[in-house]
Amino acid sequence: MKHFDFKFLRVWMVLWCVGVLLPVAAQGGAGSAEVLQLIGKVNDYWQANNSPKVRAFWDNAAYYTGNMEAYRLTGKAAYYNYSQQWCEHNRWRGANSDDKRNWKYKTYGEGQDFVLFGDWQICFQTYIDMYNLNPADYKVARAKEVMTYACHLDENKFWWWADALYMVMPLMTKMYKLTGDRMFLDRMYENYLWSDSLMYDAEAQLYYRDAKYIYPKVKTASGGKSFWARGDGWVLAGLAKVLGDMPEDYEHRAFFQKRFRELAQGVARCQRPEGYWSRSMLCEEDAPGPETSGTAFFAYGLMWGVNHGLLDKTEYAPVIEKAWNYLVSTALQPDGSIGYVQPIGEKPDPTRKVDAKSQAPFGTGAWLLAACERVRYLDGSVEDKNSPSIKVEVKNTTKDNRNDVVELEAKTIFEKLGIGGGRQFVVYDGDRTEVPYQLTHDGKLLLQASVRPASSTELTIVKGQPADYRFTSWGRVYASREDDLAWENDRNGWRAYGPAIQKSGQRIYGFDVFNKNVPCPMLETFYHSELTSYGLQDKLRKAGRGGECAALHRTLTYHRDHGYGMDAYTVGPTMGAGVPALMEGKDFVYPLCYKEVEILDMGPLRFSARMAFAPVQVGQDKDVVETRVITLDKGTHLNKCEVTYANLSEVRKVAAGIAVHKSIPDAYVMNKKLGYVAYADAMDHPEAMNGLIYIACLFPENLKSVEYVPMAKEEVGAVGHVVGISNYEPGDTFTYYFGSAWSKYDMPDMAVWQENVERYGRQLKTPLAVTLK
């Protein structure tokens, strides 16, 4: 049996720091930049090789706690989208039983009636994280139902196994932050006291996995106490997460801090010389060889403790460095997979093979947690009181009041702050109020600046941990609604139709419009209500109650305004609200619905996506492929659209425009001088009191003409298009802007809409000036 003498360890740590710690610290940003690359390599590998359509049980849910941490640090849209797909697949629920009389928790169980069992509750952590970014009540409804019910039971023996202290304890602090109800903190404390009294060994400063393993019921090969690494890893990581969310003034916080420090000491004592923790923490002979999940959770917890001032860096740095070296030199495989993860179990089991090919979602999730905390550890970005500050001056030389999203080179900010990258800084305005920001896929830092005419404002950037900013501009693919790509900001929403629509034979080519009269995101609510109505109508029909369907549909559908907006725009085989199309004579060559889409940027200030379309024939060119990149920033009515055409052999006319409907056939404006076309649309039901949609396409350069092009025959009420036309040369990019506004929100009439479009055109030519000081 291998042991460390802790007194010797303290002396060795001090000597080690002279030779290793200082050089590591000196690497600073370079080391953290490399770790950020590894986070991308590992998480990209996992997501490329594993479907998000898996159950919400602990084994998968633990991965998503790591994935959300990776998203929080990097802002990478793909990570958010992957979590979104998993949440949707599981309908934002854990175990599905609705019969509270049979809800279970006293034994292990994977059945749908184990609603109160913590392994079915860890999923709620990710649901709440997702809700905090993009609120919609249905996302946290089940979490509130289950956890409130559990807290009102006269019972505190829910967490009878060590894993639960990661599965559920952090959920309780998240529930407190979600609801503001201290009941969740107090019940967490009561439940933890019972768990602690059952499983904590004060001499070893470690937790038994559960009551079955308490000494002397189970002994190691050498006759000692048996502690399971992943079990104690769950506890240390869980305590870190709890302390991170717990109010500083919570009356029992000191108890949680005390246990965290004690457990850290117990963990550090039994690290193996190679940097890992063996499955049997005090007796490696029980299950020889390295193990990654426990090691990663320990590394995460220890670095979190140092980063937040609970653990002394000088004392714990040697342990941390050896653990990290194991995680990147042994656990991390060349292809980006994480190996040496003990399979699902509850003890140090020598019969279970653990090698480089031993992978599991919870192992990858634990590695991601450790890696994200490693970045902050290297950069000192959690509590750096001596952080350099960067002053950003944003100057407005125009006569317009400006509220623009501005861009800086993120790399420059990273270098000036001495960090390797990621969301490791905070932006403040002149009143010391935190300002949301965004890192983009193409290396930009986005800030929104509100600047009065002919004046300037100053922002300050310092190292720190930013808040989780709620989305304003965002979007996603709604696979359950025929692959709609829908996106929105605080002004309006839009939709592009995808492969499922095209496969169905429906002829819908143009951009659709969602009207909004609230600034917060509403697409999730729109789609949830609409899709819920579909399901309920099917149930009614099957039950012979088809007559109730129409009334039910009206109460839920997004085709009616329920106080926050609606979809009341018909697209059909037209340009709709602004798509581009190559021209042959007076005819438009539509690429139909998008074939593939990649979301590039996901809020809070900018949404962008790249759509690729199936090949079409244009003249003699048979395989012309259109690609569109759509960009929508907070605070604007207009999207930027950048269009390219591959395999085009000659110059062609390209147009973008708006369908004109017979309900108001002459309500369009063409302004060649200022480069735009606009239209006031009466929407689907002109007889209803739905107001008007104002639509526009703006062409800042290379506009050849503006025209009204009548249709050969009427299509879904459309009789023509008002378009702007340019020449497209092979290899070029056709850039224009399209957008809309609603008379029932912020655009009272067509004259104001035209003024808005014209002002936007002026501002494109005179952007805000951004200077670093």
Image (spheres, helix red, strand yellow):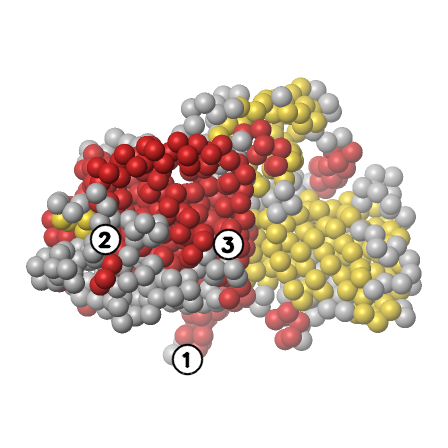
Q: Give coordinates of residue 590: x percent, y percent.
A: 78, 65
Mark pair 2, 3: CA separation = 40 Å
* Lower position in the chain sequence, tag 2 or tag 3: 2
Q: Which residue is mark 2?
A: 2
Place residue 227 in its image quadrant.
bottom left
Place residue 500 in its image quadrant.
bottom right
Place residue 280 in its image quadrant.
bottom left
Q: Is residue 593 above or below residue 198?
A: below
Q: Which residue is mark 1?
A: 542
Q: Amino acid at mark 3?
A: Tyr
Using a 10 Å C-alpha cutoff, classify the residue at mark 1 as few (fewer than 14 neighbours), some (14 to 19) or many (20 or more): few
Q: Amino acid at mark 2?
A: Lys
Q: Which residue is mark 3?
A: 79
Q: Give coordinates of residue 63: x percent, y percent.
A: 40, 58
Question: What residue is shown at x 41% (from left), y 52% (from top)?
Answer: 327
Q: Amino acid at mark 1?
A: Lys
Q: Cβ–Cβ below 8 Å for labels 1 and 2?
A: no
Q: Is residue 751 above or below residue 585?
A: above
Quarter that holds the N terminus: bottom left
Relative to the observer, which residue lies in front, 123 or 681?
Answer: 123
| Callout 3 secondary element | helix
Quarter that holds the C terminus: top right
Q: Mark 1, mark 2: which one is toward the viewer?
A: 2
Question: What residue is shown at x 12% (from left), y 62% (from top)?
Answer: 218
Q: Residue furthest top?
A: 455
Q: Mark 1, mark 3: which one is toward the viewer?
A: 3
